Image (cartoon, rainbow, N blue to C red):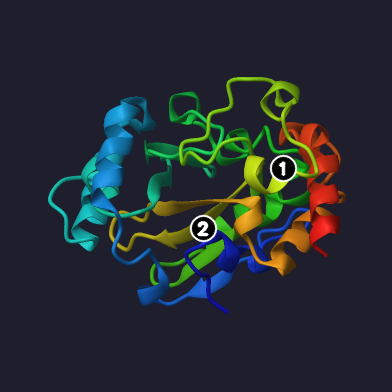
Amino acid sequence: MTLGYSVDALLPKTRGGGQLRMGLVKLEENEWLQPQPDWAARAAGFADWPQGVQLTPEVEEPGRELAAMLGVNGALPEAALAVHEDLCLLTQRPGEEVYRLIGAAVAWPSDWHPAEKIGLPLRALHAPIAGYEEQLATGVDRFMETLRPGPIYGRCNWFIAATGERRWLPDRPPAEAFAQVTPENAGETLFVRSERQSLRRLPHTNAILFTIGIYVEPLGTLSPANIAMLGRAVQTLVSGEGDRRGAPAYAKSLIGYAASRA
């Protein structure tokens, strides 16, 4: 099983509600990153939001290793300009067992600010995610500890947003952001956002690279099967997860729209 490069291709591989899970698939090298990235869009993304680049002194060496892997001169910021994906590097400090975020080059975040996350350990990074500590944390820690250089693993997720912009930093309460959404117009006013993520360990510095490829489409442009899946999934989000995602403000409209398209 592989992962595509569009919302329609990714949604069938995502978790359709219910218990949190990593849902990893193994990727071949030629499936790792999106081919033919839009370099102009990447440059504009970082120019518009320079705070998306956050670096610690520890990231210099792994950043240069990554850039060399991608055939780029420089370090993490230059590497992120050369690919579609946002890039994060994590490592263990001497004497610690936890992995920390030591560098981030993120043009298109999904409701997070790298400046608030840089230097944090893995569990603190994911603290806002309802159910993470109870359902995922131990498994993620074990995966990170056992990941070896060579294999590449991927996963994907989905969110519902009130904007089709790649950079998604909600600045209004969900009730306000989704106030104009109805079952009749949800196809044009709800946007489905999917992150195509990958994990691999760099062979020389031993840092772990986390990539995030962002894809956004209006709900109404998706396949009938994917619209139906979202209509079901929004009803079964983990307790608390739906609130964090703003689901109470759009769920009825999404479910009604999905029913009308069935």
Question: Does residue 150 appear left or right of residue 259 in this picture?
Answer: left
Which quarter of the figure has residue 127? Answer: top right
Q: Amino acid at mark 1?
A: Asn
Measuring 84% from the left and 49% from the top, which residue is drawn there?
A: 255
Quadrant location of the N terminus? Answer: bottom right
Q: Quadrant of the C terminus?
A: bottom right
**Residue denoted by label 2:** 196
- Labels 2 and 1 touching (C-beta < 8 A): no
Question: Where does residue 47 sit, x and y in percent of width and height?
Answer: 26, 31
Element under disc 1: loop
Q: Residue furthest left?
A: 73
Label 1 packing within 10 angstroms: few (<14), some (14-19), many (20+): some
On screen, residue 174 versus residue 232, left or right, reads: left
The type of residue carrying mark 2 is Arg
Give the label, 2 or 1, closer to the camera.
1
Residue 163 % position (x, y): 56, 36
Q: Secondary structure at mark 2?
A: strand
Camera-side residue of 198 and 3: 3
Residue 85 in view, yes or no: yes
Rounded to the nearest whole Å, what is the CA distance between mark 2 and mark 1? 27 Å
Q: Position of residue 98 (x, y in %)?
A: 54, 42
Let me know if residue 58 appears in the view: no
- Foreground residue among 217 and 136: 217
213 or 153: nearer the viewer: 213
Q: Few, some or many C-alpha atoms within 10 Å of disc 2 (few <14, some 14-19, many ≥20)? A: many
- Residue at screen point 30% across, 44% down: 42
Q: Which residue is mark 1?
A: 185
Left or right, 137 with respect to 74, comes to right
